[in-house]
Image: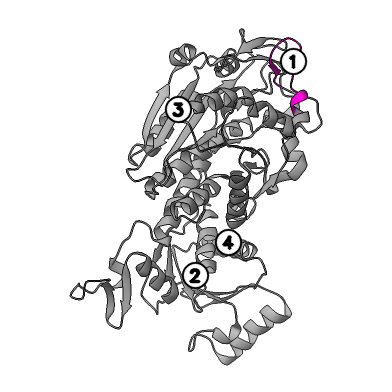
Amino acid sequence: MYPIISLTDKEQQLDNLVIILSRLSHLPAGLFSKSEKVYIGEQVEKHKKEIVRFNRIDYWIYVFVVKEEKEKPKQREACRKAGDKTGKLLNEQKAKRVAVFDTEGLTDETLAFAEGMALGCYQFLKYKNDRKDQNTLEEIEIYSKALEEVEFQDAGYKMQDTGFQRKGQADADKHPASSIQHPTSSIQLLNILTDAVFRCRDLINEPNSYLTATVFAGEVVKMIESCGVSVEILNKKKLEALKMGGILGVNQGSLEPPTFTVLEWKPKHSRNKKPFVFIGKGVVYDSGGMNLKPGDSMMNMKDDMSGAAAVASSIYAIAKAKLPVHVVGLLPATDNRPGEKALVSGDIIRMHNSMTVEVMNTDAEGRLLLADALSYAQKYHPGLVIDLATLTGSAVRAIGKFGAAAMQSKAVAEMEILKICGENVCERLVEFPLWEEYGELVKSDLADLKNIGPAEAGMITAGKFLEKFTDYPYIHLDIAGPAFLEKQDSYRGQGGTGFGVRLLFDFIAKFAKKQV
């Protein structure tokens, strides 16, 4: 159970309160004594605290002062982190409900605060018998006249002195704020998006003892079955018929069959003539195969399907929000094991597009799955293909947990837009080049390609390998750093983060609004 965010029209509530403002002069009248106002000023100005709290015995009041930043995305991210911090305090106090008051019309900051609070409440407790530390927060109510007005204007309503009235309908009924629902309101979109992130995190955090490739495909079907998304699961026989040598090769050492899940959201009035195709790496567990991973490097390799989880969850959110954009998701899935028939170094496999690949290292398996999916994507004549994959340690060493390594081919403008979206939601991208010289590093003496280059620029040579299987605008995102975290990191939590869901959703939402 995670907190639901809602918009309320109730100005006074004796409950846990958060007051959001940018200037202390805007503190609500009658809520604080003169000495309390002096105390708040000292804490904010002298001690540089962004959150000041008061215990009212029956409830708590939190005052959050928004610090103005030159860059708006940075300001929103600070609000998300403040929301997470406040949410943790409320959960410690076993609070079930909080009302967030926007006193100055800071709609973006208020929504970001609520988003951080909600996302920070995530816990994966499926296998815990002792749940005494389970979070209690269930409701986040927002009071904001500015947001309320924006919501109803966007929904086709205009403000009247006595309520809300439908534009162009003079005799229409008046509606209180609490009674109107609109599928594209900011609040509802935020609830859809946080739900999608939670679902993505759940998938990533599941152990391989439960989440085989077959179970993963089934979980995806359960998630999207009520959203109007069409789904097809290609089984092993179908993959053999399609000659997907990359997926089948990686699967050779496994006792579990592979799957290839195809999702398609195609609304009647799509804004795009050519679909966007999202591809996610779905290695449900990666031992490294015959090139077995050393030491504790296998500890969290259940997360090697984070890309596939992010793609499935983002399409779930896009469909739930009914965004008028045609989107396809391709999710190749298997585990990578050192079984009796497993690939060994030096083996040569034939891919879906008939290219041959010399397998130099069986731990460079993710690109083999992606390569088959990339060539399969050609059947859709896509306008743009984006893949997400926990692909290389090289990407982690380059930029750590703070963003994804990104590369593009024939998609210069699209990459710039995606980077802006990354800044908006703080799922940032660092672009690396795909110069032709890198292609020389994945040429094989015995086959068309080899699946790994030298140690230098490893994430780029992986991207260059994948580019060989494309003939359309293409963006590759290596999310190995931010997809799974060993330690708590604000609202991103610990374990699976759901990185990529908010990024892809923001990208498609902007396209739906014709902002790109």
Name the amino acid, label 4.
Arg
Toward the viewer: 101 or 383? Answer: 383
Q: Which mark is residue 93?
A: none
Give coordinates of residue 57: x percent, y percent: 49, 76
Residue found at the very far left of the displayed protein: 171
Give coordinates of residue 271: x percent, y percent: 41, 47
Name the amino acid, label 1.
Ser
Q: Which mark is residue 107?
A: 2
Q: Is residue 358 left or right of residue 248?
A: right
Name the amino acid, label 3.
Thr
Dividing the picture into quadrants, the one containing residue 86 is bottom right
**Is 462 within the magenta?**
no
Residue found at the very far top of the displayed protein: 340
- Range of the magenta residues? 439-451
Question: Mark 3 and mark 2: span between their CA atoms?
Answer: 39 Å
* Crowd rating for badge 3 (residues with CA inside 10 Å; few <14, some 14–19, many 20+): many
Question: Mark 3 and mark 4: span between their CA atoms?
Answer: 33 Å
In the picture of the structure, the residue carrying the numbered disc 1 is: 444
Question: Mark 1 and mark 2: span between their CA atoms?
Answer: 55 Å
Q: Which mark is residue 80?
A: 4
Question: Mark 4 and mark 2: span between their CA atoms?
Answer: 13 Å
In the picture of the structure, the residue carrying the numbered disc 3 is: 261
Quick one: label 3 or label 2, which is nearer the N terminus?
2
Quick one: label 1 or label 4, which is nearer the N terminus?
4
